[in-house]
Image: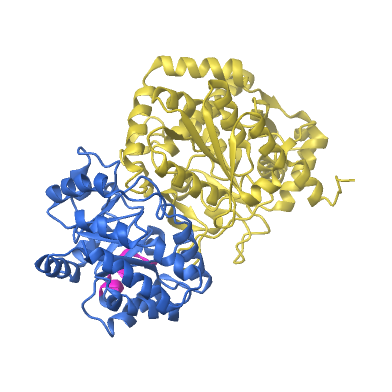
Chain colours: A yellow, B blue
């Protein structure tokens, strides 16, 4: 597969920003020139060694990369099947993979002379990462966050404020992540000259899906090298959770042309993927549509109106998914599955007690799927799961779900 | 030749600019909305832009966002919007109707089906905010083939280098967005708009209507004096949102129309 470029899964997107039918640039005319400028600047930066040298330096000394590829011995024993490795991106500065991408975009913003950074955030991890890097470079930072999320993610809101960011609660729509993204786009249309929109996932208009993927691919590149050093070969399977899909795309992309590697993305099944639509599994329970600048699988009703996703994890609670995932799904290169809130909660607790790692609820979804497949795999099967975030932010949600009253 | 072309030719002969109104289909409900739309030509509207409600109106300010929400809550759909146009056409065969909104409901219905039904219902043109020229194959070109005008937005960020691309497949008229921002925000400035209108008119040979930020009869007059048409939306739908009666809404439209036509 890798030897034949025509069959490569790694060459997308095309010059129109398409992965097959997915992706594209579905934005208003006001934003179109800005997106073309960004694309031109990214194309220049990508070929510029000094850009990557600065990234590498910050990744190493500020973020703490490379993140370890950790052999989870006790989980492996617990399942009695595959050999489980965790890619420890939860050990990054700010506690998740989000900062990998934010650093890249902020360096680009600096090259473009932009002085004001805007971002959307759901659970707050991308907002915190953006506020952090803006503080590091002395840039003004405005984070749009759904009013509902502001309420349920109070610690992250305070963190962003400590870091000097302005947090704007968004009350339009239902006040969640998709509404925060709408509001960020509205802000961008209004402040075109000085503002850079730092998108947190592999979605949005081209070049964002490709650019964010490239910045996050450090996860997969490191994994490949670390596994080679440790086991002398490629892993047999990769598992990662998917909301918009940036941590998953980062892990998967460097392996797409290695046909022996089985790749599995885990969507948030909420209360279950059925006609009630109380989930956030866009691929398993949605159909193609156009939102936020790209064509991809979306949760929507018969009229093409967007349906609010549900997940216990505010970071997976988005009605869309990155267009490259939509394409990989249709091509059959990556398998996409879903797990429910309850299964994720069980996995959360398993990780705490078995490995002494409090995971974020997002990667708890990935672990829940590992729980289902690992026991039946042979002991020489190398499975890598992306532990993309830590769970400090989630302890209140988990306490509530477990019926624990933390206020007393 | 659509009703849009005919209307601009007539207005040009009369030596006046077009007054273009935007209302949201199905706001606050189907029947009231139909009543308002039916009253618009009598209140002085030369062209009617009819909003297709969408859950995620990324280019709109609060007034039009809320109008869309009210319509959706009252059960509005794209099919019902086309039904509303059909009902309007039973009593008015001259006033152009331009549907304005976002791509997903159209994509979800199916472009070919949508175009066939829209044409049959009496729709004359489309403005789809999230379809820039880079995505012309999606809807713009099929719409032109189906005999509908595809009206493009040009904005202050559309520079000379980009303008030809924006105008390439535009027909009917060009909608100049007078500000960088969302609908219903900052006020449009006629002095700043005049040279832009001239630039776009020269480049396209099409009438240029100006919208975003026109809220009063005075600003409608100022803009109409430098453009081929003035578009008012948010100010009208805000009245619907405030629970004003159809007569009150149409009375306000009349005052704006008088302003625009005084230019």
Q: Can residue A189 be seen by looking at this rendering? A: yes
User: Is B112 displayed left or right of A251 in the figure?
Assistant: left
Q: Is residue A44 above or below residue B63?
A: above
Q: Is residue A212 above or below residue B260?
A: above
Q: Could you tell me which residue is drawn at 19 percent across and 45 percent down?
A: B195
What's the magenta region?
B109-119
x, y percent for residue A216:
52, 30
Q: Quadrant of residue A232?
A: top right
User: Is A57 displayed left or right of B98 in the figure?
Assistant: right
Q: Quadrant of residue A59?
A: top right
x, y percent for residue B22:
35, 65
User: Is B258 displayed left or right of B164 in the figure?
Assistant: right
Q: Could you tell me which residue is drawn at 45 percent across and 65 percent down?
A: B238
Q: Could you tell me which residue is drawn at 48 percent across and 16 percent down?
A: A54
x, y percent for residue A234:
56, 27
Q: Is residue B108 magenta?
A: no
Q: Quadrant of residue A96?
A: top right
x, y percent for residue A328:
46, 45
């Amino acid at each position: 597969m890798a030897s034949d470029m025509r069959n490569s899964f790694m060459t997308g997107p095309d010059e129109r920003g398409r992965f097959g039918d997915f992706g594209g640039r579905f934005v208003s005319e006001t934003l179109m020139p800005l997106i073309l400028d960004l694309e031109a600047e990214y194309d220049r930066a990508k070929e510029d060694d000094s850009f990557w040298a600065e990234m590498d330096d910050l990744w190493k000394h500020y973020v703490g990369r490379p993140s370890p590829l950790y052999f989870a011995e006790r989980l492996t024993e617990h399942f009695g099947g595959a050999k489980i490795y965790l890619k420890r991106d939860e050990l990054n500065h700010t506690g998740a993979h989000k900062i990998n991408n934010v650093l890249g975009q902020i360096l680009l913003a600096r090259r473009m002379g932009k002085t004001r950074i805007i971002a959307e955030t759901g659970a707050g991890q991308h907002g915190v990462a953006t506020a952090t890097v803006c503080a590091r470079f002395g840039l003004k930072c405005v984070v749009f966050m759904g009013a509902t999320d502001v309420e349920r993610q109070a610690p992250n809101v305070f963190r962003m404020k400590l870091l000097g960011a302005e947090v704007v609660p968004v009350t339009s729509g239902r006040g969640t992540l998709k509404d925060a993204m709408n509001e960020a786009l509205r802000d961008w249309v209004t402040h075109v000259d000085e503002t850079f929109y730092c998108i947190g996932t592999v979605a949005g208009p081209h070049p964002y899906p490709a650019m964010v993927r490239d910045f996050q691919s450090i996860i997969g590149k490191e994994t490949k090298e670390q596994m080679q050093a440790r086991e002398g070969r490629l892993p047999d399977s990769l598992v990662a959770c998917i909301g918009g899909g940036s941590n998953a795309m980062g892990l998967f992309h460097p392996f797409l042309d290695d046909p022996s590697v089985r790749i599995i993305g885990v969507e948030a099944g909420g209360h279950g993927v059925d006609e009630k639509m109380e989930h956030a599994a866009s691929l398993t329970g949605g159909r193609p549509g156009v939102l936020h600048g790209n064509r991809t699988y979306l949760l929507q009703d018969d009229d093409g109106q967007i349906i609010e996703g549900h997940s216990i994890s505010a970071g997976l609670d988005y009605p869309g998914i990155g267009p490259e995932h939509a394409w990989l799904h249709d091509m059959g290169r990556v398998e996409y599955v879903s797990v429910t809130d309850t299964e994720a909660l069980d996995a959360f607790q398993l990780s705490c007690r078995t490995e002494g790692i409090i995971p974020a609820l997002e990667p708890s979804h990935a672990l829940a799927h590992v729980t289902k497949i690992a026991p039946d795999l042979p002991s020489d099967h190398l499975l890598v799961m992306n532990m993309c975030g830590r769970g400090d932010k989630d302890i209140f949600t988990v306490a509530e779900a477990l019926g624990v009253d933390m206020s007393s | 030749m659509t009703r849009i072309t005919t209307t601009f030719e007539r207005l040009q002969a009369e030596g006046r600019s077009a007054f273009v109104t935007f209302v949201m289909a199905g706001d606050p409900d189907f029947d009231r909305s139909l009543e308002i739309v039916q009253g618009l030509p009598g209140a002085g509207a030369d062209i009617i832009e009819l909003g297709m409600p969408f859950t995620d109106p990324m280019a709109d300010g609060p007034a039009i966002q809320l109008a869309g929400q009210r319509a959706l809550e009252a059960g509005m759909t794209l099919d019902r919007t086309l039904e509303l146009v059909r009902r309007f056409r039973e009593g008015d065969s001259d006033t152009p109707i331009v549907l304005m909104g976002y791509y997903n409901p159209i994509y979800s219905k199916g472009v070919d089906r949508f175009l066939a039904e829209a044409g049959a219902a009496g729709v004359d043109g489309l403005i789809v905010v999230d379809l820039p020229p880079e995505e012309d194959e999606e809807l713009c070109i099929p719409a032109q083939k189906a005999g509908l005008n595809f009206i493009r937005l040009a904005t202050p960020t559309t520079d000379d280098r980009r303008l030809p691309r924006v105008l390439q497949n535009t027909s009917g008229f060009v909608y100049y967005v007078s500000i960088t921002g969302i609908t219903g925000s900052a006020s449009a400035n006629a002095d700043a708009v005049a040279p832009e209108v001239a630039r776009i008119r020269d480049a396209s040979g099409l009438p240029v209507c100006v919208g975003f930020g026109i809220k009063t009869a005075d600003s409608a007059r100022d803009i109409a004096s430098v453009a081929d048409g003035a578009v008012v939306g948010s100010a009208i739908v805000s009245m619907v949102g405030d629970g004003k009666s159809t007569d009150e809404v149409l009375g306000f439209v009349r005052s704006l129309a008088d302003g625009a036509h005084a230019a």
